[in-house]
Image (cartoon, grey):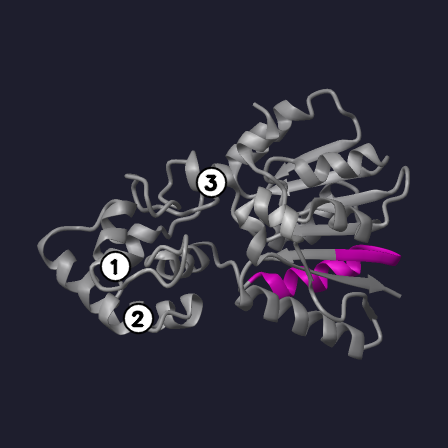
């Protein structure tokens, strides 16, 4: 399978440039995905530990990089980056890359309910070994709990009425499918802009909670810094304001403590040309931190 069918990496060249890759040095790609960023690191002579919590991504990259002795692929969560680095002898590395977005494959081909428009069971677990699913949240959590996560993680202004309608709907029958949930929300909200589905923020909130996406970022960045050699860099690509805020604040905290310096005073954004080729790039922000 060609990589662009699995996932098109965002901010590819600027991320690789920011890592300042040196031949024979070790790098960790904590969000392997389809392997696009990883391939670029390998081409520049880097030795890579690729990590992904999604077994589909792991298996795809094992096929893609079959026979390449400069890459080690691990099935795991980047929150365990310290343990995975120790287990695979990557304690002293020159760079770490985290792309916090969902892949095209997860949205369109995983069958796990990430997509608003597809008739798929509401699951949204990136790692299917985890217990909590979006279906559990939608059908078992209270109105107060639903409203809270929709506000906090989706920044959804209509969170109260959406939570209420979900409760009313599930009284009669369980909400099982992603397009079923999207239809409930579409009856309440209109599109906020071109290409923006009324259910986007709710799906974002559910995905964040199911996968604890925000809870692991700060600790991962701290662990990552401890794995770096002097002058090593962490490059993080985020896709919504909640993620970006955590990355920004953590990097500033590390800088205040004298651990290193923030390389990007403002986040790097995709060019018009990249956005035209890949709509997902429009919300991407990249920040870089260098250890001293």
Mark 1 surroundings: few (<14), some (14-19) or many (≥20) residues within 10 A: many
Q: How many labels does the image show?
A: 3
The image quarter containing residue 230 is bottom right
Q: Is mark 1 on a helix, strand or loop?
A: helix
The image quarter containing residue 142 is bottom left
> Residue tagged by mark 3?
106
Q: Can residue 86 be seen in this view?
A: no
Image vertical order of residue 115 relative to residue 252, above or below:
above
> Residue tagged by mark 2?
159
Residue at the far top in the pictured view: 67
Q: Distance between the residues labelled 2 and 1?
A: 10 Å
Q: Depth-wise, is mark 3 or mark 1 nearer the camera? A: 1
Q: What stretch is highlighted in magenta?
A: 216-234
Q: Give left or right: position of 239 versus 65.
A: left
> Residue tagged by mark 1?
185
Residue 191 at x, y percent in the picture: 33, 60
Question: In the rendered structure, does residue 46 fall within the stretch colored magenta?
Answer: no
């Amino acid at each position: 399978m060609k990589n662009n069918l699995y996932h098109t990496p965002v901010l590819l060249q600027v991320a690789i440039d920011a890592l300042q890759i040196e031949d024979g040095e070790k790098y960790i790609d904590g969000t392997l995905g389809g392997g696009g960023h990883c391939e670029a690191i390998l081409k520049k002579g880097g030795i890579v530990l690729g990590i992904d919590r999604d077994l589909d991504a792991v298996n795809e990259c094992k096929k893609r990089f079959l026979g390449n002795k400069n890459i080690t692929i691990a099935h795991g969560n980047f929150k365990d980056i310290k343990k995975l680095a120790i287990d695979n002898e990557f304690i002293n590395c020159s760079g770490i890359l985290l792309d916090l977005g969902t892949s095209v494959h997860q949205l369109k081909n995983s069958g796990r309910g990430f997509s608003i428009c597809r008739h798929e069971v509401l699951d949204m677990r990136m790692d299917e070994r985890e217990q909590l699913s979006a279906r559990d949240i939608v059908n078992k959590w209270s109105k107060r709990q639903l409203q809270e996560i929709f506000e906090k993680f989706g920044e959804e202004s209509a969170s109260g009425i959406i939570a209420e309608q979900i409760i009313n709907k599930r009284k009669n029958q369980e909400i099982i499918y992603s397009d079923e949930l999207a239809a409930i929300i579409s009856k309440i909200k209109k599109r906020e802009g071109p290409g923006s589905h009324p259910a986007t923020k709710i799906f974002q909130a559910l995905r964040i909670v199911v996968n604890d996406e925000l809870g692991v970022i700060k600790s991962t960045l701290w662990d990552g810094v401890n794995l770096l050699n002097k002058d090593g860099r962490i490059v993080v690509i985020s896709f919504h304001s909640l993620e970006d805020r955590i990355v920004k604040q953590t990097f500033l905290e590390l800088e205040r403590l004298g651990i290193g310096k923030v390389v990007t005073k403002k986040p790097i954004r995709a060019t018009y040309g990249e956005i035209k080729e890949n709509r997902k790039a429009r919300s991407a922000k990249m920040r870089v931190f260098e250890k001293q």
